Amino acid sequence: MTAFDSAIQLADMLKARKVSARELLDECLARIERIDSDTNALCWLDAEGARAQATAITEPPDEHRPLLGIPMTVKEAYDLAGSPTTWGVGQYADNIAESDSVAVERLKAAGAIVFGKTNVSVMLADIQSYNSIYGTTNNPWDLTRTPGGSSGGSGAALAAGLSILEMGSDIGGSIRTPAHYCGVFGHKPTWGLVPSRGHGLPYMISEPDIAVVGPMARSAFDLEVMLRLLAHPDELHSAIRYELPTLAGRSLGDLRVAVWSNDEAAPVTREIAGRVELVAQAFRDAGATVNSEARPVDSFHSHDVYYRLLYAYIGTGEGTDEALEASRREAAALAPEDNSERAVELRASTMDHRTWLGLNSERDRLRWSWQTFFEDYDLVLAPQTATPAMLHDHRPFADRTIDVDGAPQPYWQQIFWSGLPGISRLPSTVIPTGTGDAGLPIGVQIIGPAYGDLVTIQSAQLLEREGFAFKAPPAYAS
């Protein structure tokens, strides 16, 4: 047994009585005690309660409880009875969950021991993970860099071997960017496939626009186990049943793959684009049909719809009526030709319902364009962000930039790649491709058709077998 074995491997060890649930948990807790002062990935821990659960387990995992005895953590944003759910917002520091979120309920029902929570961005609204309650989470590959956000604690915990499985959430890459930055696997499900009830602050009840909840792990095989446990309708939709398509025995060489390695709407470094091409070459070498020119949508139009609907949802947040009215006045005073980032955000966060409905129609046009595209292709390969993990930068958003081969880019421009499948409600799985020139992990996302979640995850499994697999950060590999 190692700290980096997959949940499937550990479940097999539990079945063979080669290890106990208590031993697995104690290994995680020992690593947390030794390592987490560096990473600050964990923000809440119930070691005593978890030990009691683990000690009480005497049966092996089975088909009904495949995660029985597997210790795991979840993003702080999920309700876990008895733990704080703050989203990194100071005024909710004393908000203690009275019950479990749907996702936590389902994981516990499968036997998982949910023993802690991992750190997040303030309001889950950053590519980095820091806040005034829990502090800053560091990337285990380089502590001067961010593990990503907003599921940054999740990515760091997996990469450092502090937890076996994780649950993140994603509206602008919050699962996929930490997976990319930390060298692990992450899956953004089709919108609505996994209920998000219980992933929210007290005033949140509706299924959020664009945002999803989904699994993170060190193996794509673990992603499939988790998704199959999670992908069931909530009680309000109890008559619905999902039959998700699979690869059904197809190999890499049987697939039709489109490659979108760079775009003028959000340029990426040569190294990042090269990793997309590296994955594409693995498909070519296997005999797959690979096309580097095909595009399902116009990149600028897609990003415009995404960015405006994103801010229509997150821009109002929990702000006061007075603050919203002030934003409306500021938006009304904008010059018609002002298309600055601030102007776009102001207009989006104060738009009227008729404008929103028009954008929603544009979204559906994008969704149908993708649907038609996937009649000819199975997958799209794309970058996740413009660069590997960035240095910590806690300046105001407007002052932040990223360096793309010597050219500064706006900080938020890179969420183009997250929004590409996000606005069209598509599944996307990020896989690790190894480290780059700076010794930092680089991930690539695999985008599939609506409800093609198992297609992207199983494609990731095939690639994992070809060597696109998790590797531990050298400083914490033992």
Image (tube, rainbow, N blue to C red):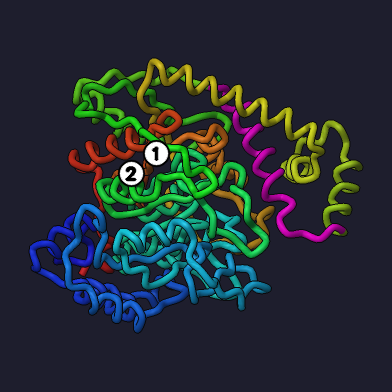
> Which residue is found at the position 24% from the left and 56% from the top?
66
Can you identify the residue that label 2 sits on?
431
In the displayed image of the protein, which residue is found farthest to the front? 239
Q: Main secondary structure of the magenta part?
A: helix
Q: Is residue 464 above or below residue 131?
A: above
Instruction: For residue 151, say whether it is visible.
Output: yes
Tell whether 349 sits left or right of 377.
right
The quarter of the picture where the N terminus appears is: bottom left
Residue nearest the viewer, comparing 36 with 225: 225
Residue 323, horizontal then vertical, whole percent: 84, 58
Q: Is residue 437 visible?
A: no
Q: Secondary structure at mark 2?
A: strand
Rendered image: mark on residue 294: none
Q: In the rendered view, does 197 fall on the left or right side of 177?
A: right
Disc 2 from disc 1: Cα separation: 6 Å
The residues colored magenta run 297-321
Q: Is residue 68 magenta?
A: no
Q: Residues within 10 Å of mark 2 (few under 14, many from 20)?
A: many
* Residue 291, quarter of picture: top left
In the depicted structure, whether residue 235 falls above or below residue 54: above
Residue 159 image point, x, y percent:
32, 61
**Picture disc at residue 445:** 1
